[in-house]
Amino acid sequence: MQDDPGIFVGKGEQPVYLMPRLANRHGLIAGATGTGKTVSLQILAEEFSRRGVPVFLADVKGDLSGICQPGKEHPRLHERAEIIGLDPYTQESFPVVFWDLFGKKGHRVRTTVSEMGPLLLSRMLDLNGTQEGIIYAVFKIADDQGLLLLDLKDLRALLTFAGENAKDLRLEYGNISAASIGAIQRRLLVLEQEGARQFMGEPALDLFDFMRMSSEAYGNINILAADKLMQTPKLYATFLLWLLSELFEELPEVGDPDKPRLVFFFDEAHLLFKGAPQALVDKIEQVVRLIRSKGVGVYFVTQNPLDIPDPVLGQLGNRIQHALRAFTPRDQKAVRAAAETFRVNPAFNAAEAIKELGVGEALVSTLGGKGIPGVVDRVLIRPPASRLGPATAAERNAVIEASIFSKRYDQPLDRRSAYEMLNERAEKTAREEADAAAEKPAAKKPTGRRSNRQGVVEAMLKSIVRSIGSSLGRQISRGVLGSILKR
């Protein structure tokens, strides 16, 4: 495909293309609700897939599942294709893999507590600085003790241990207050109610399963069902940020390939930054800047470009700006900000054009041959080849049942981990105490009352404290966002 000019986006004064070898320079799709952002995302996903590039995207509104089905004949679509010179225009389905954190509309997606890491876990729980410090201490205790943190019951067990044994742990791990432990446990209860119990555990997702090809050499389009997930925006944003950070950690450097290894679409991108501490925003900026060299393109989809911090926005080289409405001072500022980011086209005023764009029309600027942004053009976006709108439940289920991932991810796995190991230690200590008591002559009954349960708990805690600092298990190495570095 030496003569391939690139991914055909649409036509303005001239046909507009996105060059695959510059697609890993990231991008932005912005615009008000109902202006055509979803269609722009859909045509890019189709074209990347057609060129053998796997895609991951979150289906927030539930209407991207139709990509697995060929489009329906419609006079308006053919009229748009004829106007922009898209010939031939044919309907086509694309290889889709459905995923769902809740396992209802796709294969389950799971990660372990260790892989999530203390920073992202604290972000998901919305912890303050003191509580975040305790989460870091608990992770360090797990590392020192060789205790696997796989699911939320492991984390709960270790938090309970840390709280009940805070006095003995204070010198090595800092102050661990009962009040802070209680606050974290309450946040975990809320998180479990929101569905995190199903997300935390095994079998953990192998990210390379997102990077597979179909038998026709098309890149798989991985669609995450996010309509229910959007009801818990912290969980949604943290999951996608974890996914991005894991890609950064696991993929090798490839420089600037002829096409991306994976393209990642982050819909409702404002949720990633809303309320995020500056330290986390800095980490996001670092990952976005550096993941380009891993061959991953990240495309943020949002209503307002002001939702993206300037350091991140400055790294988004390929831009599709749909209409914005200027009803408020903030809206007017967003229009000016969006217009000023484009390379000027003397044929029209970008700020005025943004307010006048119709549905399926956008201002588009893509990177040129030397990575220089092209002059902005007012573009009619090409129609998609796959179905506009959702697939039916029967169509979705047929795709899921035919997938090779059904047996791999749909059944949970509960390995021996921190929860089981702490219980085993407690039971062993209880048996040893019982045997020792049976061998000794009866002692004078103490005047104070003490329950057997408390004795077992204390024995367990003392046993664990004695082994802190020993060489049980190797130290776990975590990456830029605190996630485990897999080998």
Image (cartoon, rainbow, N blue to C red):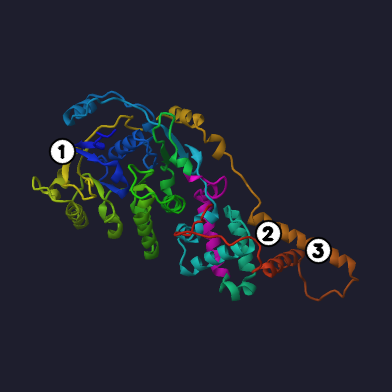
Q: What residue type is labelled 2?
A: Leu
- Quadrant showing the N terminus: top left
Q: Earlier in the sequence, mark 3 or mark 2?
A: 2
Q: Marks 1 and 3: in contact by CB < 8 Å?
A: no
Gap in angstroms between the C-alphas marked 2 and 1: 65 Å
Pointer 1: what residue?
Answer: 12
Residues at discs 2 and 1 in contact (Cβ within 8 Å):
no
Q: Give the range drawn in magenta.
A: 178-207
Residue 8, image x and y in percent? 24, 36
Disc number at residue 128?
none
Identify the element where label 2 is drawn. helix
Q: In this view, does 90 lie above or below 365?
A: above
Indicate left or right for 322 with 410 as reference. left
Q: Name the residue under label 3.
A: 432
Residue nearest the observer in this picture, 102 or 305: 305
Q: Is residue 179 magenta?
A: yes
Residue denoted by label 2: 422
Please name the predominant secondary structure of the magenta segment in the image: helix
Whether residue 274 is visible, yes or no, is: no
Q: How crowded is mark 1: few (under 14 residues within 10 Å), some or many (20 or more)?
A: some
Task: Identify which amino acid the numbered label 3 is placed on.
Answer: Glu
